[in-house]
Amino acid sequence: MFRVFRVSVVLILGAILACLPACSSKKSDKITIGVVTNCTADFWRIAEAGANKAAKEFDVELQFRQPEKDFDASAQMPIVEAWVTQGVNGIAVSVIDPKGQTVDLTRVAKKVPLITMDNDADQTGRLCYIGIDNYEGGKAAGRLVKKSLPNGGTLAVFIGSTKSANGQARTQGVLDELAGQKDAPGEPGTHPAKPDMKVKKYGKYYLIDGEAKEDGGPGNAQTIASGVLARVSGLPDLCMVGLYAYNPPAILESAKSKKMVGAIKIVGFDEDWETLKAIANGEIAATVVQDPFMYGYKSVEALAAKARGDDSKLVKDPIAYRIITKEGGPDETVNGLVVKNLKVADFEQKLRDDLASVKK
């Protein structure tokens, strides 16, 4: 009897001890989501705040990474591959080079739930894309150019990457709006006031060098903008278009250094704090904004739900872009989209409220 009792106690203790690692393991089985950006910028700090808010609300361990090298897929993919090896429950990527990364991201999507945000790669098997319709956003920027220079003029377009899906779509959207046609190729030629400058004509507008000026990241943006401004100094009816978040502030700093503020119109993209400040000061005409806070939030929300067997949070439609100006204006319906025209002061307050909500 005593022996039977001892055996029973041993078995019970063994069961308890066996359970301890399992319970401990279960405790550490928190859903882990990885989010990787395409560059380092304030835009992504706002997105990280949204991702952190969602991580807290949905009980997720978040790994948010901005690659050390801007717009370099070879710096981004090792981060993604490491997460696959670690067995994370979902990955969100702002794709740098859709064409070049399709094979690798397709392989990743077969192993880990994958979504794209801000920059898409729709041939990878990703679950959804979280972002605006970048072509329509580009057209909105084109309308702002036409509003700034109603009689036509000379413009330059600045962007971080022309390989990215959003870079291509935004640029083409601007040019199509100016030309008044889809997939506008532009008319090659030389500038009427500067015969040594090659341009492409889109409607009433001359695009300097006939292409967008690619800077590869924030580090080169001001240098490239300064070079263009030096070439066009003295020309009337100038507009500089910055299509990544850091471009409008870089253009403005270049204009200040050359005493050209007021001599050029600046149309921006995204909600960089310096851009918003410059709109309030009348130095930048307007900016087309996305919603990086919501990008981060929705990415984590969707992947956390997917990890728990719920597909209902996967985003089906583009997130609406908005127009920010000094005074704002009435909402518009453009190509079936309701576009809000917001006053910069109101938009800044909303952005601050979003960021403050993460700390609550």
Image (cartoon, rainbow, N blue to C red):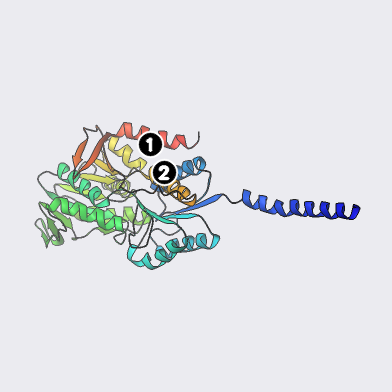
Please say whether residue 139 is visible from this viewpoint: yes
Q: Position of residue 304 (x, y in %)?
A: 48, 48
Q: Amino acid at mark 2?
A: Ile
Mark 2 — residue?
46
Closer to the camera, 84 or 291? 84
Sequence-earlier tag: 2 or 1: 2
Q: Determine the CA span between mark 2 and mark 1.
A: 9 Å
Q: For the image shown, how many numbered marks are present on the structure?
A: 2
| Residue plotted at (14% across, 58% down) | 184
Residue 183's quadrant in the figure?
bottom left
Q: Position of residue 251 (x, y in %)?
A: 28, 48
Q: Amino acid at mark 1?
A: Leu
Residue at the right extreme, as displayed = 2
Q: Determine whether 34 is above or below 259 in the image.
A: below
| Residue plotted at (11% across, 48% down) | 152
Rate crowding at label 1 as few (under 14), some (14 to 19) or many (20 or more) other CA atoms within 10 Å: some
Rate crowding at label 2 as few (under 14), some (14 to 19) or many (20 or more) other CA atoms within 10 Å: many
Q: Which mark is residue 51?
A: none
Q: Which mark is residue 351?
A: 1
| Residue plotted at (74% across, 53% down) | 15
Closer to the camera, 342 or 130? 130
| Residue plotted at (34% across, 42% down) | 271
Closer to the camera, 355 or 249? 355
Element at badge 1? helix
